[in-house]
Amino acid sequence: MAISRLVLSNWKEANEKTNGEVVDKSNQLKVSDMWRDIQGAKHWNGLLDPINPLLKAEILRYGDFAQQCYDSFDNTRSSTYYGNCKRSKSSLAHRLEFLNCGRGYQVTKYIYANTSLLDSIFGEESSEGVAWIGFIAVCTDPDEIKRLGRRDIVVAWRGTQTPFEWMENLRDILVPVMASKATTYSNIQTSSNPDVRIEKGFLSCYTSTDEDSVRCMLSARDTVVGEITRLVKEYKEKEEDLSITFTGHSLGAALATLSAYDIKQIMVNEYGVTSIPVTVFSFASPRVGNLSFAQHMEDIGVKVLRVAYVHVGVEISIDSSSSAFLKHMHNPANFHNLEVYLHALDGFQGNNNLPFKPSGRDPALVNKYSDLLIESLQIPSEWWAKRNKEVVKRIDGMLVYSPTTPTPVPLPDVPL
């Protein structure tokens, strides 16, 4: 199918206009003017139909944080470093800056998960028995803090990619959440409501450890709780406005929701902090818990804005079939790809059947890991790859495989 000149010209025009800061032209507001509304203070009332341009730009920005969890993950099974992050924390921060989604953010912590669980539950393994599954970053640049209107802490989670893994994500095994203090590093807090239940696979992925692994001596939860607590204490003393934003796709979206729930309870119950917004921007999340869990999320003030189909929060129902850039396929599994969600969101105008209108995101990104763009765009399929598959020429002229060395193994701060 040939793409219309009107659609292509709309994308080119939008692309030229998004080189600078996005402004809501209806009232000339900037992100700093309405950041609390963007973070869900009013449940996004009045911002979705039609969608507010500042809100959409921020959702796309956080989506790119989640996308970097895929792009920076070494998923080449033949690689010595399979299952690790391909970048150091400083290199990842530079990448976020280059993409303009994390300008002025410092990556402070990597999150790892026990791969015995990822393998048995989500079909994923690694060479070291542990897999990199996300990162924590904080905005440290004064100009970006001014643009955002506050200092922002981001927790980005990596998801799963294959249709088999996605179906496994949906296994319906609900388990109770064990009550515990925040200083107990094995379980997450819960309300006094004994009916709160969470999907077992997500809870296990979040809380399990591996004593034989240096990177997994602490659970993913231990890392997140410890680092968020440290950052909040550090910056709260400066009497700055803070926000904590969780984002992820697929499994990552479920972990984003679960960890936001956990962090919000710790902040309220342990430290009496209620003024810091805790927000989740999730993409293609499966159900995380039962209705009691969803109600408790709302009661404690976690704001969840979901793109597509999930379980808790406010929803943006995008439709990839409305994009003239994409092939028409009938298998929904073909579109379980974060770049497709971000592309569809880029052209989304509201939940009231408004036509697809690109706002500047390059459609070529869709084919990064897929073959979903129409042929007339002439974008190669699955074009995202390591340069020469990391084969390099030695000084003696021989071609050898030389994979990038991953981040050095951190020494965990094991609680006493």
Image (cartoon, rainbow, N blue to C red):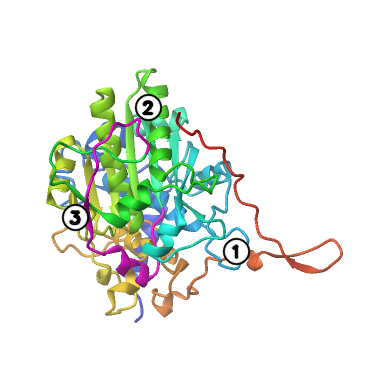
Left or right of residue 42, residue 246 in this image = right
The answer to whether residue 354 is seen in the rendering is: yes
Mark-to-mark CA distance, 3 and 1: 36 Å
Q: Amino acid at mark 3?
A: His
Left or right of residue 303, residue 361 in this image = right
Sequence-first tag of 3 and 1? 3
The answer to whether residue 34 is seen in the rendering is: no
Q: Which residues are magenta?
A: 158-185
Is residue 164 depicted above or below 197 in this figure?
below
Assign a secondary structure to mark 2.
helix
Sequence-first tag of 2 and 1? 2
Depth check, mark 2 against mark 1: the one in front is 2
Answer whether labels 2 and 1 touch (C-beta < 8 Å): no
Residue 367 position, x and y percent, is 44, 69
Q: Amino acid at mark 1?
A: Lys
Task: Report the residue marked by disc 3.
Answer: 311
Residue 155 position, x and y percent, is 39, 42
Task: Report the residue marked by disc 2.
Answer: 232
Mark-to-mark CA distance, 2 and 1: 37 Å
Residue at (39% x, 74% y) in the render: 372
Task: Report the residue marked by disc 1.
Answer: 386
Within 10 Å of disc 1 (Cα), the crowding (few <14, some 14-19, many 20+) is: few
Q: Quadrant of the N terminus?
A: bottom left
